[in-house]
Image (cartoon, grey):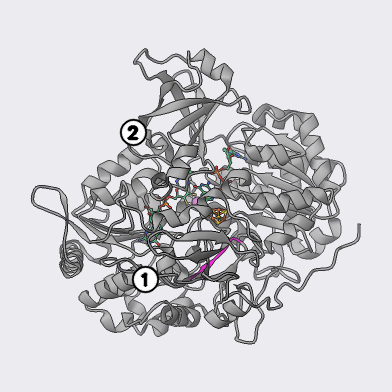
Amino acid sequence: MDQPELDDITAPAGGTLAAAGGGTLSHCPYCAFQCGMTISGPAGAPSIAGDPAFPVNLGVLCVKGYTAGKTIGHPERLTSPLVRNARGALEPCAWDEALGLVSSRLREVQRRHGKSAVGVFGSGALTNEKAYLLGKFARVALGTANIDYNGRFCMSSAAAASLRAFGLDRGLPFPLEDIARTDVILLAGANPAETFPPMMRVIDAHRARGGRLILIDPRRSPTADAATLHLRLTPGTDAALANGILHVLVRDGLIDRDYVASRTEGFAEVRALVATYWPERVERITGVTEAQLVEAARLVGRAGTAMVLTGRGPEQQAQGVKNVLAYVDIALALGLPGRPFSGYGCLTGQGNGQGGREHGQKADQLPGYRRIDDPAARRHIAEVWGVPEAELPGPGRSAYELLATMGDPEGVKALLVMGSNILVSAPDALRIERQLRRLDFLAVADFFLSETASQADVVLPSAQWAEEEGTTTNLEGRVIRRRRAFPPPPGVRTDLEILCALAERLGAGSAFAFSGAREVFGELRRASAGGPADYAGISYEKIDAAQGVFWPCPTVEHPGTPRLFLERFATPSGRARFHPVKHSPPAEVPDPEYPLYLTTGRVLAHYQSGTQTRRVSELTRLAPEATAHMNPATARRNGLAEGDALVLATRRGRAWFTARLDPGLRADTVFVPFHWGGEHAVNRLTNPSLDPVSRMPEFKVCAVRVERADGNGATS
Ligand SMILES: Nc1nc2c(c(=O)[nH]1)N[C@H]1C(S)=C(S)[C@@H](COP(=O)(O)OP(=O)(O)OC[C@H]3O[C@@H](n4cnc5c(=O)[nH]c(N)nc54)[C@H](O)[C@@H]3O)O[C@H]1N2
Ligand SMILES: Nc1nc2c(c(=O)[nH]1)N[C@H]1C(S)=C(S)[C@@H](COP(=O)(O)OP(=O)(O)OC[C@H]3O[C@@H](n4cnc5c(=O)[nH]c(N)nc54)[C@H](O)[C@@H]3O)O[C@H]1N2
Ligand code: SF4
Ligand SMILES: [Mo]
């Protein structure tokens, strides 16, 4: 088949500043699509519309985006700092008092237990400027090694796999619109119909061109409606399935030998390994029939162009990195990465999940996607920050390890959280709750009193997306601008102002004398210069002139890089690396006591821990309560009908849900969205077993028992 021509998508599109009909052009506060939107007044109740000029969403928003304005003037919004009083209740106080208390308590903990006894927990919800400044704040103002962030729970397995295979991690190494132009999409463990609704526009265009979609998911999710083929695998068996597909590709002579010889290394070992994954064996492990396996392999193997994409399904496992590498092996064997309208990509999740993983809020990382243990990187960043290199801390603990040891002799004694609701979103939440109580001091910056903020000693009210300037980097690696539509309400400060004010009180004011986001971005450009994620040539003006700029962009003259790897990969040899991956079972598999698989994920109407979306009535009407989804046969076996209350129990805890019957789900699997807190938090049940490389918890697989909520005991 002819290779289609690549469009020049770096040509300036212009006009991004003036929204038709007035209003401020910006981007959605929620997911990594960062849909373009117009925000128009009044500040207390803004109205939101899609931006037809932004190529990612072309004017379309999902229901969360349309209703995002409802969180701005919300009556539960925090408008004053809160401090825990002698009676144990949170009460309003002045900013000076709150900031003074945070800095003095953090210093006191550091005096008694050492600098790294203070932990910082960041987020892929933070703009690039905030993520960058939070990392600098931890290393320079506090001098602690212990900073990590919620992206560790998100796409870290795919990031680690891409680094290993390609030498560089940018979620999609091509623009989203290329997906519409590929012939076959192999989509493993993602449900874009609910998690990235505008992607269905791309998938519809793909199908209209005659494209085929193969979906790999234990449940028939709404996305399956668009699929040609749905492989309903047993949870936790992705590596075996991917090896099985590659086995058939080798057997049937569908490998791109020239590409494998010229652009990759390590295939011989993988070929030898997948030879042992014959279809009958794979069927036994995965539950996917030989016929389906062969059909999938032939669809993707005979396509002119194809893309292999992963979501959190295979990634959020204790062998998440290996699962992704096994899918990448398929892409490499077919010669896809670095070819037009082909390749491997990870669908990054959070609003700034991409930029948030590049600029130094990760335990092992410095800005520009540099490694904190690389001497040259340390020297460069120390110089930008004006501190001696020897004073920069080394690598700290990963997210779950940081949280699971809070208050322990070797763990942090104080924690500052910015942009995460850990009591709802971290695995084994009851343990996190116990550890949190052992802290000497907890400070949380948020717009609402989240489950986590309600446990804090000090709560700092932050400005929301429409009230501040900053950049985010969407799932394509496109750096875009969020623009301020109106000032924050009285009593509220931006996260950047909060960090600078705290740094000053901690005696580091001179390194944090920023007038605003634009100045922070200027320093981020210098810090990232020469690093893998190079933003040196990106400016706010340049973003305005086009529809964002794709990194790397090393100089002012450089147009940015929409497509990576066209000539060479970012590995030392320039070749992509195959990785042989053996299947091993998940950390916990069903047994007579806990006879079913539990897997977790999302529904359309809610975002993450739900702090924002559970406060929007249009969304709570769509998804009012915490639900556990199961096959009607499973429900029947447990004496349950649609809408019945039930308890789920695992080795870690119990939680309460409403039964939702879903014939598309495997009968051995219960699916639960994680958007609710307290006794409805599915993370009370999840297994914190970690991937050895990415330190990703096994959110997607553990063993569970269904009980009736009326106390009539275990029935399944
Ligand atoms: N509505 C909504 N949209 C969101 C978000 C949100 O909270 N709500 N969050 C954003 C963020 S941060 C993220 S990370 C993305 C996540 O986006 P997705 O990855 O699309 O979302 P999930 O629902 O976590 O998981 C996707 C699918 O993995 C399947 N799965 C479970 N176990 C396995 C397995 O063992 N193997 C395979 N192959 N699949 C499995 C689940 O059934 C589920 O359908 O969504 C983003 N968009
Ligand atoms: N069981 C299970 N657990 C999961 C997952 C799963 O699939 N299953 N997915 C994991 C994934 S992929 C992710 S990304 C995490 C996400 O989980 P969390 O890290 O809890 O993310 P959010 O719910 O977005 O929390 C953001 C919090 O910060 C606030 N916030 C948002 N933006 C800002 C900001 O700019 N500044 C400040 N100061 N506050 C802000 C919000 O109000 C909210 O309270 O959950 C993980 N947990
Ligand atoms: S798809 Fe994502 S970015 Fe777009 S409107 Fe919905 S939540 Fe916002
Ligand atoms: Mo995520």
Can the viewer see residue 268?
no
Direction from residue 77 to residue 217 in the image, left or right: right
Disc 1 marks which amino acid? Pro
Q: Position of residue 243 (x, y in %)?
A: 71, 41
Q: In the figure, residue 339 lies in which quadrant?
A: bottom right
> Mark 2 or mark 1: which comes first in sequence?
1
Q: Which residue is mark 1?
A: 487
User: Dot 1: within a 10 Å radius of its alpha carbon, few (fewer than 14), some, or many (20 or more) residues?
Assistant: some
Q: Position of residue 570 (x, y in %)?
A: 65, 69
Q: Secondary structure at mark 1?
A: loop
Q: Which residues are magenta?
A: 471-475
Q: Position of residue 442 (x, y in %)?
A: 24, 55
Q: Residue at x 27, y 67 (%)?
A: 490
Direction from residue 688 to residue 669 in the image, left or right: right
Asked if disc 2 is less than 8 Å from ligand 2, the answer is: no
Residue projecting furthest to the left = 86
